[in-house]
Amino acid sequence: MNKEVEERRTPCRAVITGYGSFAPEKKLTNEELAKMVDTSDEWITTRTGIKARHITSDNESTAFLATEAAKKALAEAKLDASEVELIIVATITPEMVFPSTASFVQRSLQAKKAWVFDLAAACSGFVYGLSIVQQFIESGRIKNALVIGAETLSKITNWKDRTSCILFGDGAGAVVIESKEDGRRGIIYSNMYSDGDCWEALNCQAHGSRHPSNRPLEDPKKIYMEIKGREVYQQAVRRIVEAVTECLEKCNLTMDDISMVISHQMNARIIESASKRLKIPEEKVFLNIAEYGNTSAASVPIAFNECARSGRIKHGDIIIFVAFGAGLTWGANVIEF
Ligand SMILES: CC(C)(COP(=O)(O)OP(=O)(O)OC[C@H]1O[C@@H](n2cnc3c(N)ncnc32)[C@H](O)[C@@H]1OP(=O)(O)O)[C@@H](O)C(=O)NCCC(=O)NCCS
């Protein structure tokens, strides 16, 4: 491990002790989408790798999805909700403008001891959340935390815009992180980056102070998210490569030491292209985008949960989480599982 990284570490390790995910029952397939907009299963599959996405019903909200995922993670960790000290919900589709989605999760779980907040770093939110918790645990400030990525992107999707509506889905993933002093397991290293100059590449403008609710929108479409797909594509490949390369360098690791790279699932072609540049063998790249589409902050924890539960990774493996999204934001975590 790089000296600078080693020197900063305390005996407290931020170890993932529980994980879980939840997706709404309703699924929307490419064939069904092709009846709504001018597209086809063939176009969506070849350009993105997506075959279907889960969509919430009218009465399913972000906090509901987050709570269901959190319950599974707490059960796996055998940690009672009353013991949780911090809850972070990474989301760009919050329950309300305020209070935070995390407040509703705290209430549903009756996690009375926790302090809670939402984290708005779009698709990088979960990776940012782990990085923040790592700092609080390594400094000894907290003993445990729940980090949840939860999204109901279908609620801000323009279902008439074929360039964006094919991409997104709903879901939630959660992890319990606990402080352990007895070994090497845990988050080894995290990086986080952003570039506000490129905010226009991905955005949803309504309901903020720039377009307040008490004034009519000059463009009604601004209640939906907008993306500049091509620009995002190029930036995503570049930033994923940079974040993973920096992780390997700082931790004195090579790709041979890594068992699995779990990327934000934004487009199978973006992940494949970045993996090729990083020379990651196919079997070390986890993909579940076909079933979920892009679920933003929920994407990495949903993928991690499936990867761990299917036995594709085992304790002692070194894995990398990497994400990229609106802001722009990007970042990665190196974890000994
Ligand atoms: C959106 C994305 C799949 C588009 O793929 P692409 O290969 O870049 O396609 P383009 O946007 O250049 O469009 C190519 C053509 O397909 C058409 N097209 C766009 N969406 C289509 C759809 N759903 N079905 C059929 N045709 C479509 C375009 O109109 C264009 O037609 P034209 O050549 O006649 O103008 C891809 O750019 C992408 O995944 N970008 C990143 C996604 C993203 O932003 N994720 C969120 C952030 S993490």
Image (cartoon, rainbow, N blue to C red):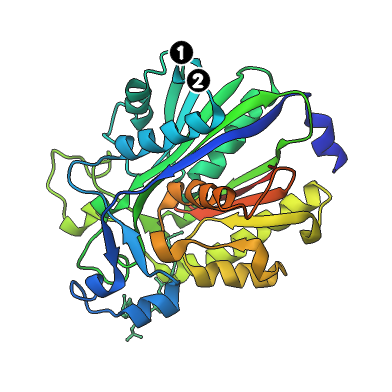
Out of 89 and 33, give the one closest to the viewer: 33
Task: Kindly identify which residue carries mark 2.
Answer: 84
Inspect the image, locate mark 2, and give the three-letter code of the amino acid beneath it. Val
Q: How many marks?
A: 2
- Residue 321: x %, y % from top left: 61, 50
Q: Secondary structure at mark 2?
A: loop
Q: Residue furthest right?
A: 3
The vertical placement of 284 against 47, above or below, is above
Inspect the image, locate mark 1, and give the three-letter code of the amino acid beneath it. Lys
Q: Residue at x 63, y 55 (%)?
A: 312
Choose top left, top right, bottom left or bottom right for residue 244: bottom right
Q: Relative to residue 337, is residue 83 drawn left or right?
A: left
- Residue 324: x %, y % from top left: 53, 55
Out of 157 and 208, give the one closest to the viewer: 157
Out of 312 and 40, give the one closest to the viewer: 312
Task: Kindly identify which residue carries mark 1.
Answer: 113
Tag of residue 23 = none
